[in-house]
Amino acid sequence: MAVEHGGRTPAPTALEVLRSLDTGPRGLTEEEADARLARHGENTLPARRTVPWPGRFVRGLRDPFTAVLLCLGLVSATVAAWGTACVITMLVAVSCALRATGEHRADRAMTALRELVTTTATVVRRPADATPPAPRELPVDQLVPGDIVRLGAGDLVPADVHLLRSQGLYVNEAPLTGEAAPVPKDAGSTAPPSAALLDTPYARVPYACVPYACFQGSSVTAGSGTAVVTATGSGTRFAAGYAALAGAVGAVGAAGAAGAAGRAAPPIRPGEPGKAPTSPREAPSPPSAFDRSVHGISWILIRFMLLTPPLVLMADAALRGRGLETLPFAVAVAVGLTPEMLPVVVTTCLARAAVRLARTHGVIVRRLPALHDLGAMDVLCVDKTGTLTQDRPVVERAVDAEGRDAPEVLHWAAVNAWWTLHLADLPAPDALDEAILAAAAAAAAAADDDEEAATRCEGIEALPFDPVRRLATAVVSRPGAGLGVHTLVVKGAVENVLERCALPAEERARLHAQAARHAATGLRLLAVATADRPARHRAWSPADVRGLTFRGFVTLRDALTPAAGPALRALADRGVTVKILTGDHPGTAARACRDLGLDVDRADVRTAADIEGLTPSALSELAHRTTVFARCTPEHKARIVAALRAHGHTTGFLGDGVNDLPALRAADVGVAPHDAVPVARETADLVLPRRAGDGPVETAPADPAGLTAIDHAVTAGRASSTNIATYLRSTLSSNLGNVIAMLTAGLLLPFLPMLPAQVLAQNLCFDAAQLAFAFERPAREALRRPTSLRPRAFLRFITGFGALNAVADLATFAILALAVPGPTGTEDESVFHSGWFTENLLTQALVMLLLRTTRGTAPPGSPGRPGRPAPITWAAAALAVTGLLLPLTPLGPLLAMTPLPPLYYLLLAAVLALYALALTTLRRALGRRVTAQP
């Protein structure tokens, strides 16, 4: 008979499930299974749609910078400036090809990582109706609804199943719920979930509080069971939950979270179809930091370029009476303002960093712009379990009733764990028993005792842990107690053990208060009690566990990840704040933070209840100043991440389960460990290296979550972003100065200040030299703080330095008037063009050298000899030599240029010296923040 679970729909009985699936305990026949396989399909999740290389190439054309270049190329072709159009088309093609190749390579690496959840399952089937059933191993993808499967310790649950029989069954649902502790499962359970389970945030997700069902993606940690398959493939809760959570990013507002509050999971009924998951990147995601920066800078350039040609045409028409013959020059000026090499430089910087991370640290970059977002990241949100702490507890202390250290309490706890494991025929100890046995072994080693105390007792019988009684009992014969005495050793939940102890009410209340004080500090507690009974031959039962003598408490804490502390300090030194979003108890999360050296007080710890009903602005402010959020559901995590981004933070999220999908998608950059569930890896922008022992490139054994690898990725991202920002600063300031000078000269001179072919040649030389920015190694000072492309800061920077560059160009007009024969020195067009061409390339070389944030020479340990000039030094030197020699070569006449008089070079040297001094002074006046961010 079904029982209502707190007002929810009644749970289906095993008989109802079998009847609805038209199956029975003897399993399906092969003929029935084949028919259902044809109807339901294979038991596999829908494959993620892989974008082919041509599709990635076309998608690269949607980049704002690339779109600007394509528009300029089209305008150039319209005015018959075929050289400019061809160069722009070539740059666009190279940039899109590099980006498509890098992302396609990352997709191939991800394909190699995809592994089936399990390869085979034990299935009960019959060859025909008249033949008896027989268990056999079948590939998981051949399972169908109605199959009878057997589960044992270490098995991965191959599909959604309803339990028919179970014995001591515990299932780890961490990939689905984020809760590390194994969950008890009971085939005959019709009782409502325990208050302890309902008090967790995972009571709201579809996987929790269903004791009679197991779900695909979970694993059996202890016990055994027999179950009937209720759903396979895209019909599983794993698939449906992935689709629902992946779409939850669009509903991370207050209303969505408020609506989720208090909803209990419905019971699993056979035949309930699950929605097939969509591709992790199909649902629209919020624009990342890179997208926002590119969009802002692109619009600045578009405004300048749309304004420049009309100004040139109107000025020439009004002052010189020229018409459309100046249109090619106007287009050339607009092209001169554009950083044509930007897509190539950006893609080359990011692709080189991605390849280097993959080769040296095993990090897979699935989306190249995510490296820029990592460089700009100033907040990293992580879960506690599996990241800062390991998936296992360790013993903190063993204390008696007065709170004093009591080694004998640990001794009795170890006796219980040891003999329960050996006598109850459990396949493996649970995590708490493993921690107790490890602590007892360490205590014996410290005491130089060759034999552990637990083995000195003789085991008689064991009553294993029961999820209803919440305690385990071992019956032993201990040395010195006599042959007629058996000792009951009981270990379990505090309230369940204390109620079986012979204690006055006042003492029991005092012990409950003591346990509450320990729990408030983030510790887990087990109570230990014993009782001597006359020996007997009949079996012991739970009814005999009463009248106990209380011995004390064993306190346990989460085992810290050894690399977590150093990794957090390294991230803090780089200006990255780590925030913990966990489903654990607030005290447990706060204690882990304090153990790791994080300064966390009570005000820095909030629960999900504190954010319910908050407005977006209030949540944004709360998320900014809070370090730990406990009792979080997946929707809460996504809301917090979105709130941090709304506050202006560039936010990353590290997650490994289906429950982390909303937060992974809500973050600027999502990061997943190598052993995350496949859908989490495919949703993430970065995949960290595998654990030690899994392959050639791996993370350290002490760093299973890969926090150290994140630090390497942050460094690589900042190096790439710094080089991109340096390229933009030098290019845009130099180009803006040239445009201002061209417009001024166009108003003063009776001829065009520079021919379109000369503008194109100048741009090609400058662009080729600036490709060196993609190969620079930034100075360490530039990597200490987050680096991002900020449009407003760029506008201020290029305006100031562009004006300074224009002053240098106008000074060139003056020296041409002094150095060239004639009334004004500007009557000879070829001399003017040659002098300005040379000065432009020399000033651009100075800008490259003086505005960079990189070392002047290669650092020790880098490829090549230490002290060797850096790539930008070589490129600037080549650019300067080109500017000096090109008018003297046979190419000079082809570009309408002529040799210049010696006096010009002397006067130009003086102008360049003053320009370099002014450039250095202005940069120093801007302060160190110029080197950290544009």
Image (cartoon, helix red, strand yellow):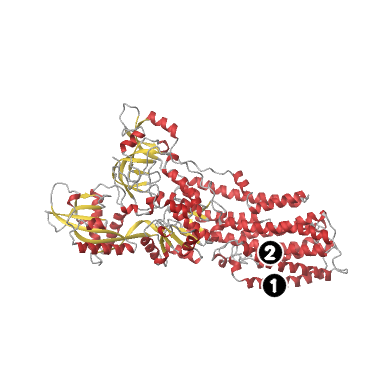
Q: Mark number for residue 648?
A: none
Q: Is residue 258 visible?
A: yes
Give the percent coordinates (x, y) of residue 752.
82, 60
At label 1, the amino acid type is Ala
Q: Is residue 551 left or right of residue 688?
A: left
Q: Residue furthest top?
A: 130
Q: Given contact means CB atoms under 8 Å apart, are the residues at marks 1 and 2 in contact? A: no
Q: Which of 576 and 439 is in front in this view?
A: 576
Whole-percent x, y for residue 817 in the image: 83, 69
- Location of residue 363 in the rendering, given as x and y in whole percent from the top left corner: 50, 54
Q: Badge 2 is on which residue?
A: 733
Secondary structure of the residue carrying tag 1 is: helix
- In the rendered image, residue 636, in percent from the top left (x then y), is placed at 44, 55
**Which amino acid type is marked by label 2?**
Ser
For residue 44, what is the image quadrant? top left
User: In the drawing, what numbered circle is on residue 918?
Assistant: 1
- Cα–Cα span, label 1 and label 2: 14 Å
Circle 2 sits in a helix, a strand or a loop, which is it? helix
Q: Residue at x 65, y 50 (%)?
A: 94
- Residue at point 59%, 44% (across, down): 53
Image position of 257 with respect to 725: above or below: above
Which image quarter holds the C terminus?
bottom right
Asked whether, in this view, residue 577 is left or right of residue 190, the answer is right
- Outermost residue on the right side: it is 823
Circle count: 2
User: Quadrant of residue 904 in the image?
Assistant: bottom right
User: How would you rate the neighbour count of disc 1 (Cα within 10 Å): few for under 14, some for 14-19, many for 20 or more?
Assistant: some
Question: Who is closer to the viewer here, 758 or 933?
Answer: 933
First-in-chain label (1 vs 2): 2
The quadrant of the image that shows the N terminus is top left
Q: Nearer the viewer, residue 633 or 548?
A: 633
